[in-house]
Amino acid sequence: MASNESDTKLNEPLDSVAELAANYNSSPNVQLSGRDGVEGKPCPGGPPRGPPRGPPPPEVLARKGMLALARNGAILFCVIWATGCWIYGSNDGAQYRVNRLKVLVNDFDGGAFGQALLTAVDSLNGNPTYPTFEQASALTAQDMSAEVFSGKYWASISANAGATSAFQNALNSTSAAAAYNSSAVYSVHVASARYFTSYQSYIYPAVLQVMGSAQQLASNQTVSAAIGMPSLSDARTGIIAHPVNYSLVDIAPLSFQARVFLNTFGIVVSHLSQFFFNMILNGIFLGVGIYRNTTFRSLIKRKYPVKVLWTLATSLTITSFPIIFDEGWSLPANSFFALWATEWVYAWINFNTVGVVLVFLPLPFVPMFIFPWIVTSITASLIPIELSNVFYRISYAYPSHAYWNTVITVYGRGIANVLHIYLPILAAWLVVTEVGWLLGDLTLAKRSTRPPPERR
């Protein structure tokens, strides 16, 4: 009888939450479907989750996407703005810091022509838009040329010994006047291979200004000395009209017009070629499954030969451009291989840097690193650091700065040789980026063995 009453009660509808709770079966839950396990097995942790939820509505996805886009776009905008300020600021007011560059001056003549030279440089000294002209009477002519070659000075100007007396002899002798060489009065030594854009903008115009002033002063003196002289021969009249001139010797020429691309396009190509190739390499390796269930040794075995061959090829390409379009300028074979080695080291550093960035930096932030990295690298090699604000001395730490100054020494066949400073900087970057690249591959190998993340 009690059993019939119980059955009748169970068949009646439940009218309250309390009755529902009272009749709830508290035995372990059995999974129906989904990601919690296998169908039919107990599901720990409470009631069944039911079938997996579908994707959020399109409106929710669109809102999330636009918020993420706005956030990353704002960051990229700030990066572009800051990068533009960096490169423009590096050259801002450079014309008022030209006095940080030095030109060596000496008077070997000791006469009127030498005094005209010293007067000309004194009129420009102290002007921030002109180099500082330093007098060095203790040096010989060969010493002055060596000082320019060493990189301590950007140019040298000298009044040659006996220039004034040679002119006076020419005034008094027709035969001496016929043999007189006005270009032997002043000597100028320059090195155009050293930051050629700055040389063309500041050093060469300053040299021309000094020579023009010295010629004008010397001409005024010679005309005054010639007044009242008896009838002059044609030869003597000619030297009075053009008493002084100068001879210019470029001890490190870099004459081909395409040289303006060496520290701009050359650096951009080295960076972008490594970036694009790393993107291609990662895409292909990911597509064919090399990055799945791999080991560190296996990755190195496959990627290291690729890195060696690619950096060798790209560095050879960059090295060949000035050789192909040299316009008659020549580079010795040993200098060519030295240049190739320098380009290879720089390409290797760039390859490693890109590899590290692609492993450890989220993909949306990769352009925010690559863009300023390239632009600031160009900035570090465009103009001498002396012409920039003190802040930009940070460029000394850039591999592009060390690379470009090494390249200048190679192009100039030994000019401004401070490789004892720049080669260790390149070596340090090489070691640091190589370690980072190896750690990146180690990270990729560890990630490849992890189970894929659960989808929610």
Image (cartoon, rainbow, N blue to C red):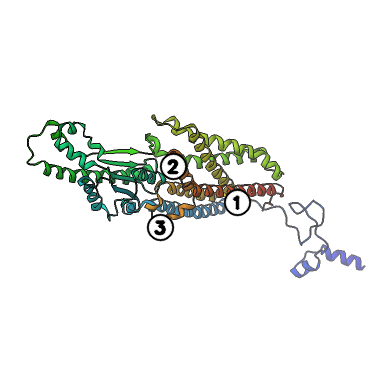
Tag 3 secondary structure: helix
Can you name the residue that lies furthest to the right here? 1
Depth check, front residue: 296 or 66: 296
Name the quarter where the N terminus is drawn: bottom right
Q: Of marks 2 and 3, which one's residue comes earlier in the chain?
A: 3
Q: Which residue is mark 2?
A: 408
Tag 1 secondary structure: helix
What is the distance, in whole Å, between disc 2 and disc 3 at their CAs?
23 Å
- What amino acid is at disc 2? Ile
Taking 25 as reference, is 240 left or right? left
Q: Of marks 3 and 1, which one's residue comes earlier in the chain?
A: 1
User: Label 3 crowding class (10 Å Cα cut-off): few <14, some 14-19, many 20+?
Assistant: few
Q: Which residue is mark 3?
A: 390
Which callout, 2 or 3, points to the residue nearer the camera? 2
Tag 2 secondary structure: helix
Depicted 279 relative to depicted 361: above or below: above
Q: Which mark is residue 360?
A: 1
User: Label 2 crowding class (10 Å Cα cut-off): few <14, some 14-19, many 20+?
Assistant: many
* Residue 60 in view here: yes
